[in-house]
Image (spheres, rainbow, N blue to C red):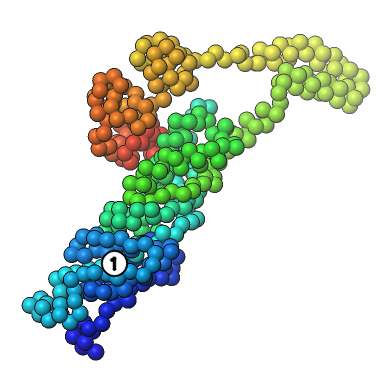
Amino acid sequence: MNQFDSAMFLENIEWFDETGKELVHRLPESGSGEIKWGAQLTVRESQAAVLFYKGKACDAFGPGRHTLKTRNLPLVTKILSIPWGGNSPLRAEVYMANLKYFTNLKWGTRNPVAFKDSELGLIRLRAHGIFNIQIVQPVLFINSMVGTMGKFTTDDIGNYLKRVIVSRFNDYLGETLDTILNLAGKFDELSIELQKRLVGDFGHFGLHLSHLYITSITPPEEVQKAIDDKSRLSVIHDMDRFVKMKAAMAMEKAAEGQGEAGAGIGLGMGLMMPGIFAASQAATPATSVQPKIICPDCQNKIASDARFCPLCGHQQLVLSQCLNCGKNLTPNAQFCSKCGHATSEKPQISVCPKCNCENIPGSMFCNQCGERL
């Protein structure tokens, strides 16, 4: 069948994802074509289709069979396009978007992220988990991420999404967690809050983050050993009574095993007991005093863990700051409550002043060295 014979027939357009990984697929696969007036488009329940005609997204289609209307008429357009070598300049293509949930996508830290622990100092953590995504705005996703690619898979976007998750995860840990010793039993809470923070990052490209899970947060081996040592000490609730018991057991064992000599050893240990008890009592740490900080707005002393100043209401937890006066802003604030300056300027890449590492916009802690940005 020659070129003019093929121009007489209408297209029947449909697509099946055989790999399970394709987010978007372009038809025809070779590029834009001469989709004719009256071509039939079949869209499944788990799909959406976007028709691009003359370079623009002109229509979107849901499930069902649809008749496409272009200005490419069978045979007539082929004759009229002879000056262009038989190729009609009225180009058209259909992008099929896969609306199913893409599950079990893995994320994790390629390199350990820095975390300033209040008890263990600067440590590096590895974290891993899984997440699920779904396309909810096909036209936005195609225009912002796919472009003119013939197909777009989870592998093409996976690395970028992983970097965003890791960066937001590092910020969230730095803001909410003081020490990894308090990490046990908080994985569900961390997962839910981290997912809320990522809604905007994913929605910017027409994606919905349906689920996100943290499966592990792992410190280095030496830090794990320190945690194990601390856990053993926490089992011993009364160190004074523990020392007394150990001393008494040692005296009893020495007296039983040495006869008369043991009696002398036991007498010596008895004379040493007051000193041992005094030392154990002296080693008992004093009750710590809640540290105070100065409110930057009213200059009054407040508790270091306070979220807001009880006197002036100034927010202490820094989520964002006014670019004009430096006042701490509440979440989603459009204007500064102090100077009225607009906060809608385009965010800039955050550069760490210590190691010069670039972090994604909005980062509060450096992924490389853990310093606050």
Residue closest to the far left: 83
Residue located at (74% from left, 13% from top): 277
Task: Tell me: residue 295, above or below residue 203.
Answer: above
- Quarter occupied by residue 168: top left
Please indicate whether residue 284 sits to the left or right of residue 246 in the image.
left
Residues 41 and 1: in front is 41
- Quarter occupied by residue 326: top left
Residue 108 position within the rendered picture, expressed as x and y whole percent measured from the top left: 46, 48
Q: Amino acid at mark 1?
A: Val
Q: Quadrant of the C terminus?
A: top left
Count of marks, rendered view:
1
Q: Kindly state the secondary structure of the residue where label 1 is placed.
A: strand
- Quarter occupied by residue 53: bottom left
Residue 256 position within the rendered picture, expressed as x and y whole percent measured from the top left: 90, 25
Residues 335 and 184: in front is 335
Residue 349 in view, yes or no: yes
Residues 48 and 100: in front is 48
Residue closest to the far right: 259
Residue 222 in view, yes or no: no
Residue located at (20% from left, 79% from top): 74
Q: Which residue is mark 1?
A: 94
Residue located at (36% from left, 70% from top): 65
Residue 181 position within the rendered picture, expressed as x and y whole percent measured from the top left: 57, 32
Task: Tell me: residue 109, above or below residue 53.
Answer: above
Residue 124 position within the rendered picture, expressed as x and y whole percent measured from the top left: 47, 38
